[in-house]
Image (spheres, grey):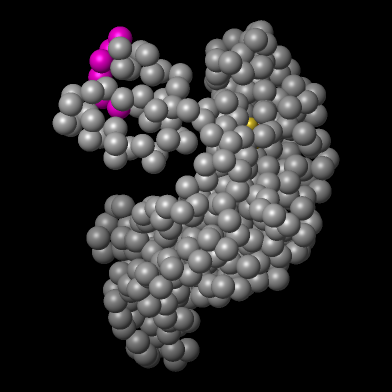
Amino acid sequence: MAERLRKDLLQKKKIVDIIVGPDEYRRVPELIENSVEKGEKGIAVKLSRTETYDDITPLRREGITAWLSIMRGCDKFCSFCVVPFTRGRERSRSFINITEESKRLYDEGVRDIWLLGQNVNSYKYEDFDFADLLKNVAIAVPDMRIRYITSHPYDLSDKLLETMAEYDNICKYVHLPIQSGSDRILKLMNRLYSVKEYMRVMLKARDMMPGIGLSTDIISCFPGETDAEHKMTLDVIREIEYDSAFTFVYSPRENTKAFEMTDTIDEETKKQRLDEIITLQREISFKINSSLTGNVMPVLVETLSKKSDEKFMGRTDCNKSVIIPRNFSTVDIAGSLVNTGLIKAGELINVEITGANSATLFGNPVQNKVAFLQT
Ligand code: SF4
């Protein structure tokens, strides 16, 4: 956005004073100072091959959760995506600095970290790959839940799955964008994997870690997608049975290869195909979530529910959000009251799932808290 729209925003529309691209954050103080003191408009949008902000400790937190950037940029050049042009080439932060930052976050009360990157599992620092980093962080902060996003199927190795399976505090959740169920479309997208290869990884993940949460991204109606190819995408959704999916109709981005491709799919068809994908996924999500009713699952309490101050939202290991009452009491087998309490963010508690819709689980604490994670 910063690079693409800078002239429009700064000179034509005159609605902003400073435009900063993703690799020039270090100049923000100087640009603000110039703007406030001298009334100067500022532009800093140069991309860098080396900037990782490794030495800057960001404050990116929401309650007990923190997002920890481990790499920047992307070298994959999917034909529909502007990221390699706007975020630059891949570069990874230091192995040691990430581990140290994880420990610091734990000491400050964080209990759930997301390792972040445009293409997080292509992380490479000296001889260490992403599986090595994940293992190292899991050992360094054993009471921290660790997740990562977003992965590319090309880089999701068996070694990474084995590492996930080995460490309890690495959450059993994989978000792996498939984008299309057709090999021809995947090739046009320059996605570097086939449907068969993708399925192998996902089914292996489920095989190794039963109950794992699986989600994906889908771009419907890529230029030239036929009805048969759309049905192939539906087939993959049926076969894998994702817990959730982020679905979009293709929209062209300037300067990408796909921008030159002729879009022949009419608006009515686009709407219909997207509706079919969303409806199918909702049915599957509802089926999976409903099947969890009656199960007892460890839930890390995160924040107050958006809809009620009397309820909390927590998350299961497999990344399902669960709504639980803030005040709770539990009973023993004979039905006697054995414990009452007020739930706090940061606690890991056992929750019996009592209901579900396609997006959320609902439940009640059933035992004494299984662990106290101090905040
Ligand atoms: S879609 Fe993801 S992997 Fe592909 S170019 Fe964009 S950021 Fe990279």
Q: Name the side, left or right, on which 255 lies relative to 348.
A: right
Say if 16 sits above or below 75 in the image: above
Q: Position of residue 251 (x, y in %)?
A: 55, 19
Q: Position of residue 150 (x, y in %)?
A: 59, 45
Say if 65 sits above or below 41 in the image: below
Q: Which residue is found at the position 30% from the left and 12% from the top? A: 11
Viewer can see residue 173: yes
- Give the number of callouts: 0
In the foreground, 165 or 286: 165
Say if 266 sits above or below 358 in the image: above
In the foreground, 95 or 137: 95
Residue that sits furthest to the left in the current view: 37
The quadrant in which the N terminus is found is: top left
Instruction: Read off the magenta span.
Output: 12-18
The quadrant in which the C terminus is found is: bottom left
Query: Which quadrant contains ligand 1?
Result: top right
Q: Name the side, left or right, on which 153 lies relative to 172.
A: right
Q: Position of residue 335 (x, y in %)?
A: 41, 88
Q: Which residue is found at the position 79% from the left and 36% from the top? A: 193
Viewer can see residue 176: no
Q: Position of residue 38 (x, y in %)?
A: 18, 26
- Magenta: predominant secondary structure element? loop
